[in-house]
Image (spheres, rainbow, N blue to C red):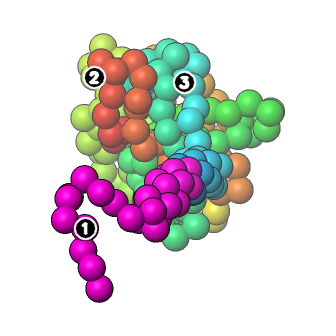
Amino acid sequence: MTFPQDSQQIPAEETRAEKHSSGNSLGLWLRDVLVSVGVSVLIILFLYQPVRVEGTSMLPRLENHDRLFINKFVYHFTAIQRGDVVVFHYPRDPEKSYIKRVIAVPGDRLSIDQGQVILNGRPLPEPYVPDEYRDTKSMAGITIPPDCYFMMGDHRSISSDSREFGPVERDLIYGKAVFVYWPTRDAGVVN
């Protein structure tokens, strides 16, 4: 076996192998990009969906025209909780979607006394509702039916919510608001 004396000389077999190797790396790179794009599309289609907020009923956290991601899959594994911000089909017109906060879950007893939500006999602390967004409306007590949820906007004085259209059936809820991504000044987790 002989070795080239000059390090500049490369046998023809290595040159062909290097050419073949660079072609493979481009193919591998393309494959990785296509797989990444495919996985991203699946995640967006089946797990997360971008939506745009229309209206101001969820001020101060969600403003008109904010863009956010909702998780469409989470409620297949976990229960809807009080305080979750959810997206649902409007009960009176399923072509429209609303975004509101879950205030009461099935079996809860709820009433509203001059704007103060009374949940299961106790005032509900609501740090997400600033004083300037409260109202003085009252509502007689109800018990939330099975598979239904009572929704309210955080800007109580202008929100069209369960006080108007009643509890929302579970089948109409299709996502949990997760993360605001635009505008960047509002970017962050929705809670």
The residues bearing labels 2 and 3 have C-alpha atoms spaced at a distance of 20 Å
At x 56%, y 36%, the residue is 50
Indicate which disc, 1 or 2, sits on the residue closer to the N terminus: 1
Q: In whole angstroms, how far apart are the C-alphas of marks 1 and 2?
A: 81 Å
Eye-nearest disc, 1 or 2: 1
Q: Quadrant of residue 133?
A: top left
Find out whether residue 42 is within the magenta segment: no
Please say if 152 is above or below 35: above
Callout 2 crowding tier (Cα within 10 Å): few <14, some 14–19, many ≥20: few
Give how far apart the Cα atoms at labels 1 and 3 are: 70 Å
Quadrant containing the C terminus is top left
Q: Amino acid at mark 3?
A: Val
| Magenta residues, start to end | 1-30
Q: Secondary structure at mark 2?
A: loop
Residue named by callout 2: 130
How far across and down, in percent of the image, does residue 86 sit?
52, 44
Which quarter shows the N terminus?
bottom left
- Residue 124 disc label: none
Can you tell which mark lies on residue 53? 3
